[in-house]
Image: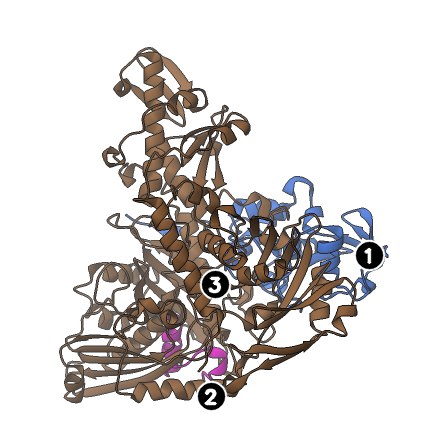
Chain colours: A brown, B blue
Amino acid sequence: MKKMTFGNGQRLSRRKFVVGAATLAGGGFALGFKAPFVAEAAAQGGVTEVNIWVAIKPDDGCVIRIARSEMGQGTLTGLAQLVAEELECDWKKVSTEGISPSRNLASKRAWGEMGTGGSRGIRISQEYVRKGGAAARIMLLQAAADQWKVPVSEVTVSDGIITHAASKRTIGYGKIAAAAAKVTPPDPKEIKLKDPKSWKIAGKPLKRLDTADKLNGAKVYAIDVKLPGMLNAAIKDAPVFGSKVVSFDDAKAAKMPGVKKVMKVRDTAVAVVADTWWHAKTALEAVEIKWDEGDNAKVSNATIAQHLKDGLAAAENNGERRNGDAAAAITGAAKKVEATYSTPFLSHACMEMMNATVKLSAGKAECWVPTQNLEASLAALSESSGIPLAQCEVHRHDLGGGFGRRGGTQDYVHQAVAIAKEFPDTAVKLIWSREEDQAHDFYRPISVCKMSAGLDEKGELVGLHVRSSGQSINAWLNPTGIVNGKDRRQLQGWWEEPNDAQLGYTVPNLLIEYVMRNTHVPVGPWRGVNTNQNGVYMECFIEECARAAGKDSLEFRRSLMSKHPKHLAVLNAAAEKGDWGKPLPQGVHRGIAQFMGYGSYSAATAEVSVDAKGKLKVHRMVLALNCGHAVNPSQIAAQVEGSVAYGLSAALYGEMVIDKGRVTNTNFDTYEIMRLAEMPKVETVIVPTYDFWGGVGEPTICVVAPAVLNAIHAATGKPVRELPLKNVKLV
Amino acid sequence: MAKLNINGKMRDVQAEPGTPLLWVIREQVGLTGTKYGCGVAQCGACSVHINGEVQRSCSLPLSAVKASDKIVTIEGLSANSSHPVQKAWAAVDVPQCGYCQSGQIMAAAALLKKKPKPTDADIDEAMTNICRCGTYQRIREAVHTAAGNPTGGRSADRATRRS
C-alpha cells in the first residue's frame, strides 16, 4: 500500500534539526549558563536574571522559565513547583515565562530539549530544573552573605526572605538579585537537592498557575491569533490517504465573497485563502477536486481486518520476547484458554483543531502554532520556507489539547508555510475544520491479538503465547526505530526490561510476538500509545485465564507477581481502595486490571452494571498510581480523571470507519465522545515510593478499558473481545 | 450589515445572513473566547447565552438573531470573573487545556439560572458539552460548588496519597 508523501518530509525535518541542534549544543546542557538577555531583561522593568531558570523582579516576584509545552497536563505548574521548592521563594509571588525555541537555539539549547510527549515533561527535566532553582538560591544567599560580610553558612532563607539571625538582618530576593547575578554559579555536580520528604511547595496539591484566563475568554490559543492584515485559509487534503490532486475547478469558489486565492498545497491538498475563515471554508466546499486515488480507494475496515488476521497466521514476526517453550507448555497443559481480541484506529480529536499561522517576509519566517514540540515546529518552518533556523521564530501558545497529535509531524506547519508563500509579508492563518482534523490524523494504530494459555491441574498459568498483528507507529514515523526488522515499541507494556513498560507477571513459558501489518492509514502516538491495546489484550486475557482456573481475579494476578513487587503494591492499593471482595449493590459488578507504561505503575478497579437490554453504566473507578515522585497530587488526580474520560470514551465509542480508503466518520455526530453523564466517580490513590521518577499523563489510561471490560465480564459472564463497546451486544 | 447586541453593546457586523453566529462573534466582533469545536452543535465549545438561554452559536445563522436579542459571550458573563460559576471553576481548579471551558462555563451558568440547586441528574442532563481532557468530574463538583453545595454530597479530597 502506498504511503503518504509527506511522511518522509517529517522525518527528514526532525532528523535535520536534531543533528543541527546537537552540533550547536556542543556538549549539552550547562547549568548556570548565562543566556545573553541582560539588556532585554533590563528593558522589561528591572527584572534580573539570576540564571536561565530564574529571574527576579524588584518586588521579590520570581519568574520561572518553562521550556516544555503546556497542553492541559499541568506540567507548567509542576515544573514551577520544582524550581520554587529549591529556590525557597514565596509561591504566591511566582509567575512563569515560556521559552521560545529560537531563544533556546540562540542559547545553544541551554534549556534542553523542548519536546513534550511520552509523559516526560517533568520526569526528564526534574533534575536540571531543580538544580536551576537550587543554584539560584545558592547565588542569592551568597550575595546576601557577601553584602553583610558574614559566612554564608550563617544565613537562612524562607519564602524568599534571607535572614542573618545573629545580626537580625533580613533582605528580600528582589533587593539582592542584581548582586546575586554576579556571583559565580555553583558547580551543578556539587548541588545537593532536597529530600522530597522535606518538600514544602513541590509534592503539594497546589492550584494551577494557568487557570485565570481560561475562565473569561481572555486566553489566546493559536487558533485565536489576530494579526494586522491577516488572511485565513481552509484546506482539504486528499480524503484517500496518499492521493494526489489531479485537478480542481475553482470557477465557482473564486467568485465567492472574500476569496483571495484557491490553490494546490503540497500536491495532496487544495486550500482557499480568504478574508475570513468562514469565507474560506464556505468557498472550499464549492471547489471541485479530482484526486488520483489508486488502489488505496479499495481499502475498507473489512479489508484491513483481513490483512491483520492474516498476520496472526503468518510465519514471521517483527518483535518477540521469549522464555521457556510456550507452545509445548500450552500443548501439554491440563486446560487450554484461547481468545482473539481487536482494537480499532482512533483519532485524537483535540478540541482545538490543527492550525498554524505563518508570516513569511524577506529573510524572516514566523509561526504561531499549538505544538507539543516547539523545536520540531521551528524545524518545519525553516525546512518548508527555506529560511535558515536562526531567522525563524515560533511563537508559543498553550495547546487546546495534544494527546500525542502535535509532536514531531507538524504537517499543518508545512501546509501553512506552503500557503503563506503565496502571500509574502502577510500573516495567513490555516485552520482545519473538524472534518479535516478527523480525516487527517495520525491515528492510534489498529491491531488484533491472539492469546493462548495453558493451565495446569492446579489452575496455574504454565504457558502463555501472545501474538499481536497490527500497524507499526515506527514504520510510519520513525523507521530507524525498527532494528533488524524488530519493532520493540509495539510490545510496550510486555517488555522484560524493568523501569519503563515492564510486564508485571512471571510466566514460566512465555512467547510474545508482534507481526507488522501496515496499511495506508497514517498512525502515530495517542495518549498511552501501545500500552492501550496491549493492556486490553493482556489484562482481559488474564481475566479469562483466572475464570478458567476458577480463581479470584485478584488472587490469580497476585500469584504471578511475586517478582514484581512494585506492580503488586499498586494492584493491592487499587484493590484495597476499590473494596475488592466486599459486597456490592444488586446488579453491580467489579473488574480489576494492572499494567505499566511511561515509567509508572498503574492499577484500577471498575464497578459497572449491565441492564437487561445490555446498557452499560460505569459507576465508580479507583485508580492507583506509583509515579515515583508526586509533584502535585491534585494535578495527578486531574490527569488520572482525564485518562478515565479519554480511555473510556475510546472504549465506549471510539473507532475510525475506513471505507473506500478514507475515514467516513468525520465529526462528533459519528465519532462519538463520552459526555459528563457517563463519567464514573473516579478515586485516585497515589502511592509514590520516591526511588524513581515516572510519568503521569499517560500511564493510567492503559488500565481503564481493561478494568471496565473485566467488570462487564463479571456482570454478563461473557468476555468482550472487540472495541468499541457500542458495536458489542452485551446481553 | 446587521446589528447585534453583544455583552450589552450594539455592534454593526458585516457578514452574509447564513454566517454562523460563532464566526460573526470571532471574526467580525473579534471576541475569541467563544470557540470552534465541531461546527455541528455537538460539542458546545461555542456556547453563548441568547436572552438567557444557552445556545450553540456554530449552528445558528446570523439571520436567526435579531438586534433586540441579548447575546452574552464568555467575555461578558461577568466583570473580573466574578460570576459564581467562574469562581467555582477557579476554586475547584477545573480547567486543563481550557479550550472547551468557555462553553462549559456558559452551559453551567445557564443551568444555575434555571435550577439554582441542581441535582446530579440535572447536571447530567444540562452539561452535555465535550471535554477531551476529561474534566467532567471537576465540572460536576464545581457546579455544585457554584450552587452553594461545595461537596455535592461527596468528599472534596481528590487524591489519597500514601507514602
The range drawn in magenta is A707-731
Q: Are marks 3 and 2 on the same chain?
A: yes
Residue found farthest to the top: A167
Position in image of residue B75 (x %, y %): 69, 47
Q: Marks 3 and 2, how far apart in space?
A: 26 Å
Out of B124 and A45, give the one closest to the viewer: A45
Mark 1: few/some/many CA within 10 Å (<14, 14-19, 20+): few
At x 36%, y 77%, the residue is A714
Q: Label 2 sits on what residue type?
A: Ala
Q: Label 3 sits on what residue type?
A: Arg
Q: Are marks 1 and 3 on the same chain?
A: no
Out of A99 and B24, give the one closest to the viewer: A99
Q: Which residue is mark 3?
A: A405
Q: Are marks 2 and 1 on the same chain?
A: no
Q: Is residue A39 left or right of residue A533?
A: right
Q: Marks 1 and 3, how far apart in space?
A: 36 Å
Q: Secondary structure at mark 3?
A: loop
Position in image of residue A422 (x %, y %): 65, 60
At x 23%, y 33%, the residue is A190
Q: Marks 2 and 1, how far apart in space?
A: 49 Å
Q: Nearer the N terminus, badge 3 or badge 2?
A: 2
Which numbered tag is attached to residue B114?
none
Quarter of the N terminus of chain A within the rendering: bottom left
